[in-house]
Amino acid sequence: MKITILSLFPEMFSGFINESIIKRALDKKIVEIEIINFRDYSPLNHKQVDDTPYGGGSGMVLRCEPIFECLDKIKTEDSYIIIMCPTGVTYNQEKARNLSLKKHLIIICGHYEGFDERIKILADEIISIGDYILTGGELPAMIITDSVIRLLDGVISTSSLEDESFNDNLLDYPVYTKPDEYRGLKVPEVLISGNHKKIAEYRKSEQLRITKERRPDLIK
């Protein structure tokens, strides 16, 4: 898989792509990440990428030309274009799984007061990571990139992925490790019983309990 991220602040991604699981996936050539500063595609003398909104209003709006010109150069038949925007559909694990099947993701990071609306016709999907506002789309782009890469074959073991939150639309069950008692806090007896049937039943019941308490919207 290849992931191309269009951003006005490419240096923000330096630490992200050079640490932990993302770096290992890159080193193993499971994924390729390309960061492009779309300011380079501005046709204006001073590489301006934004301007005041027609009709008045506060802030600055991203102009069409840099993004259109950039996509003309980099997109292919395999490209799936995503715009990060608060007006998009809310991101979830099902979307992450669907995106992990694509060959080439292009993620466009917004900034300022948003995109000229004409830019949005370029997108296959417009995505929001939640009901709040950030200063730009760089952090959301990292979130999508991380959540997709970890689903690719060879990045994380299959068993680890199967035991995570949101499988079966449920939150994860609680986990413990040694010591079995610390400051009077004990690990549930069932987990050290060796009875795998009982352990499985306990974990499922805990998943249901936690999901009902914290995310009842997930219960179907």
Image (spheres, rainbow, N blue to C red):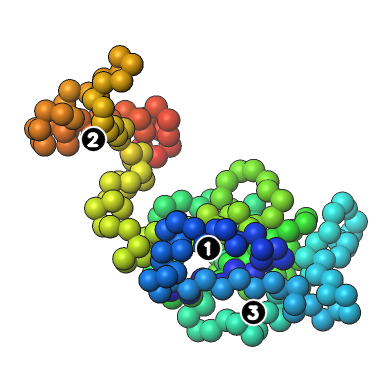
Q: Residue at x 17, y 36 (%)?
A: 200
Q: In this rendering, would 133 be left or right of 128? A: right
**187 above or below 37?**
above
Q: In this rendering, would 192 be left or right of 149? A: left
Nearer-the-camera pick, 210 or 54: 210
Quick one: label 2 or label 3, which is nearer the N terminus?
A: 3
- Image quadrant occupied by the C terminus: top left
- Residue 46 position by quadrant: bottom right
Q: In this rendering, would 199 be left or right of 143? A: left
Disc 2 and disc 1 in contact, CB within 8 angstroms: no
Disc 1 and disc 3 in contact, CB within 8 angstroms: no
Quick one: label 2 or label 1, which is nearer the N terminus?
A: 1
Q: Residue at x 11, y 28 (%)?
A: 193
Q: Label for residue 85?
A: none
Under mark 1, the amino acid is: Ile
Under mark 2, the amino acid is: Lys
Badge 2 local density, few (<14 within 10 Å), some, or many (20+)? some
Residue 123 appearing in the image: no
Residue 21 appearing in the image: yes
Q: Residue at x 64, y 79 (%)?
A: 71
Q: Which residue position holds label 2?
A: 204
Q: Secondary structure at mark 3?
A: helix
